[in-house]
Amino acid sequence: MTEALRIVVVAPDLAIQDPEDDHAVSQAERSRSLRIGLLENGFNLIATLPADVFLTERLAQLQPDLIVVDAESEARDALEHVVLATRDARRPIVMFTNDQDTSHVPDAVAAGVTAYIVAGLSSQRIRPILDVAMARFQHEERLRRELAEAKTELHQRKVIDRAKGLLMQRQNLSEQAAYDKLRRAAMDKGLKVVEVAQRVLDVADLLG
């Protein structure tokens, strides 16, 4: 059996200041229903945090697998705090809201929200929503890593090609001979070919 996902819920304070405030009572009830639904579905709800300036530090300490944002009228403010808090340590973010204004959904997705769910708080829906969000996040992270690796590889190839060209020009070597010289130097010094190539370019820049 796999370990339960460790989840942090980012939500406003449940304390109701005015029992006659139907909106506050309704929001508190749906927020409680969400948390109960998470527990009923076997998730490990490790904390409920407010969306404030301390969120980054708290998430760094807790290291959750997934963040659930429970928001309604303050959805934009909560989202801004969560996006800032996960900027350097990306995690899947699922936003549950009853706010029928979906005009900011594209901005939310672009900012890093993995799933944006309107009025989807039934207990039966929570697990498939979070499972799909987690799978989507992992897929996007894999694509992100592959893209970063491809960019790094392209940059390294350009560095090596520039160094080869420099050696070919200044030492009258063939392309293969220039590469072999870089490779031998890398083996002798216990470095990567691209590191030797960069040193060749750096020295050339210093000498003019």
Image (cartoon, grey):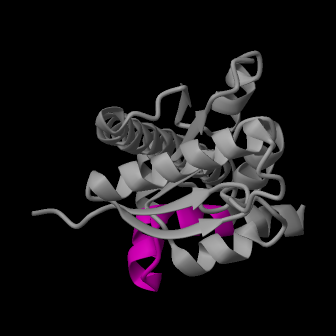
Q: Position of residue 46 (x, y in %)?
A: 46, 72
The image quarter in which residue 195 lies: bottom right
Q: Nearer the viewer, residue 123 or 170?
A: 123
Q: Position of residue 33 (x, y in %)?
A: 47, 47
In magenta segment, residue 133:
no
Q: Nearer the viewer, residue 55 or 121?
A: 121
Viewport quadrant of the N terminus: bottom left
Q: Nearer the viewer, residue 195 or 37?
A: 37
Which residue corresponds to the image point at 74% horizontal and 37% vertical from the top-left?
22
Is 9 situated left or right of 203 in this image? Answer: left
Q: Position of residue 175 (x, y in %)?
A: 48, 43
- Extent of the magenta region: 182-199
Is 50 situated left or right of 109 in this image? Answer: right
- Residue 200 in view of the camera: yes
Which residue corresponds to the image point at 39% horizontal and 33% vertical from the top-left?
122
Which residue corresponds to the image point at 84% horizontal and 67% vertical from the top-left?
53
Is 186 situated left or right of 31 in this image? Answer: left
Residue most toward the left?
1
Q: Nearer the viewer, residue 194 or 91?
A: 91
